[in-house]
Image: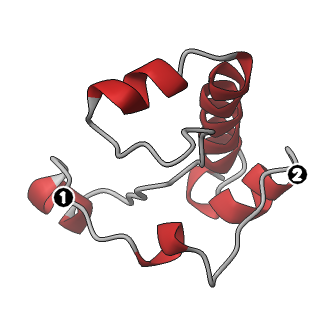
């Protein structure tokens, strides 16, 4: 449902992209065993900069990155509001 909501905001999901195969960590721990959880990704325009590096922060000072944060928040909110779990 999150992906569909993000796509309605013109966010593109490409199964062959590097982002779809990223491995990462989360602070969610065992919470997801008790509460429905997602760990969504939204692409930002960071050129070739690597996340958590100064170059990444510099590239992300942009209107397109601000829009990515807004779109990600909207898609997550819509996922919660329109989730079958909330009805």
Residue 3 or residue 36, whichever sits in front: 3
Q: What residue do we see at 82% from left, 57% from top?
A: 7
Out of 19 and 40, give the one closest to the viewer: 19
50, above or below 17, in the image: above
Separation of residues labelled 1 and 2 (CA atoms) = 27 Å
Give SS at disc 1: loop
Residue assigned mark 1? 25
Determine which of the numbered discs, if any, sits on residue 5 in the image.
Answer: none
- Secondary structure under the numbered disc 2 in the rendered image: loop
**Label drawn at residue 8:** 2
Q: Residue at 18% across / 55% down in the picture?
A: 31
Residue 1 seen in the figure: no
Relative side of 19 to 15, left or right = left
Q: Nearer the viewer, mark 1 or mark 2?
A: 1
Estimate the x, y position of residue 12 in percent, counting from the top left.
78, 60
The one of 56 and 73 positioned closer to us in this rendering: 56
Q: Which x, y percent locates residue 43?
A: 60, 48
Q: Position of residue 78 (x, y in %)?
A: 71, 42
Residue 74 is situated, as x and y percent measured from the top left of the image, at 69, 33
Q: Look at the image and tell me whether residue 25 can be seen.
A: yes
Image coloring type: secondary structure
- Binning the other alpha carbons within 10 Å of mark 1 as few (below 14), some (14 to 19) or many (20 upward) gives few
| Of callouts 1 and 2, the N-terminal one | 2
In which quadrant will I find the N terminus? bottom right
Task: Name the image quarter holding residue 57.
Answer: top left
């Amino acid at each position: 449902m999150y992906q569909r909501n993000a796509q309605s905001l013109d966010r593109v999901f490409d199964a062959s992209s590097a982002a779809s195969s990223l491995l990462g960590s989360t602070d969610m721990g065992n919470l997801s065993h008790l509460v429905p959880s997602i760990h969504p990704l939204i692409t930002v325009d960071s050129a070739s900069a690597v996340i958590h590096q100064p170059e990444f922060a510099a590239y992300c000072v942009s209107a397109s990155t601000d829009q990515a944060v807004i779109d990600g928040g909207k898609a997550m909110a819509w996922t919660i509001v329109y989730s079958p779990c909330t009805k």
